[in-house]
Amino acid sequence: MQTVTKADIERLINGMSFMILNTLIWTTIALVSYRNIYLYFVECVFAIVIIVLLYNFFVFNNFKKDLPDKSSISDDEKKRGKGFMLIFAIEGFAILLAKNILVNIQMDYLFISSIALIVGLHFFPLAKVFRRKFDYFMGAWTTLVAILGIAFILKTSADRNLINSVVAICCAISTSFYGIKMTLEGRQLLSLRKKAF
């Protein structure tokens, strides 16, 4: 029987907090970019997802109090942690660099899609670092959405604000699915813990 430790649930809690925050950011970007009655309905759906994720976030936080501490952190886990921090730092730098370049060439309207592209690409090294196949799917989806957003803005006369909003919604879908996946994993850990008693 697998022993569930604080480290197991904390990993999920930390991931969920990222997904909740990013879903909130992307849905806010979508709403600010393009105000439409249909978009308000979509935002309500994401609000429900965020509430469900938040509820489970607090359930898991409460659950971890009764769990045993992990005896030690392996070298492999330390290496993964360093890999994550490096990828995160490069992602942040790339976003700042993209913003400066786009402002200087007067193409700031590509910034939302550019962020999405950087976020999408960062999933690929994360997949390798954490050995998670799911990150490849998230990376492919987000990168494709970003490239389509850039192409539609540059090659069509469609409303740029609408395109930016759609890109942001697609990114929120990505983070929502990731948050739901983590919630299901956390629920499995809860059931494993209950079976142990």
Image (cartoon, helix red, strand yellow):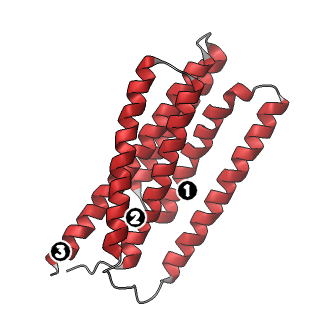
- What residue do we see at 53% from left, 21% from top? 35
Position of 164 relative to 89 (above/below): above
Q: Residues within 10 Å of mark 2 (few under 14, many from 20)?
A: many
Q: Residues within 10 Å of mark 3 (few under 14, many from 20)?
A: few
- What residue do we see at 45% from left, 45% from top? 175
Q: Quadrant of residue 192?
A: bottom left
- What residue do we see at 75% from left, 38% from top? 99
From the viewer's side, name the closer residue of 86 and 4. 4
The residue that disc 1 covers is 125
Classify the position of the C terminus by image quarter: bottom left
Specify the farthest residue to the right. Answer: 104
Element at label 3: helix
What amino acid type is highlighted by mark number 1?
Pro
Position of 161 relative to 66 (above/below): above
What amino acid type is highlighted by mark number 2?
Leu
Regarding residue 148, the answer to whether it shows in the image is: no
Q: Which mark identifies residue 194?
A: 3
Across and down, in percent, residue 59 comes to: 31, 64
Callout 1–callout 3 Cβ contact below 8 Å:
no
The residue that disc 2 covers is 12
Position of 13 relative to 113 (above/below): below
Across and down, in percent, residue 96 comes to: 74, 46
- What residue do we see at 38% from left, 78% from top? 6
Mark 3 or mark 2: whose residue is earlier in sequence:
2
Across and down, in percent, residue 150 comes to: 62, 26
What amino acid type is highlighted by mark number 3?
Lys
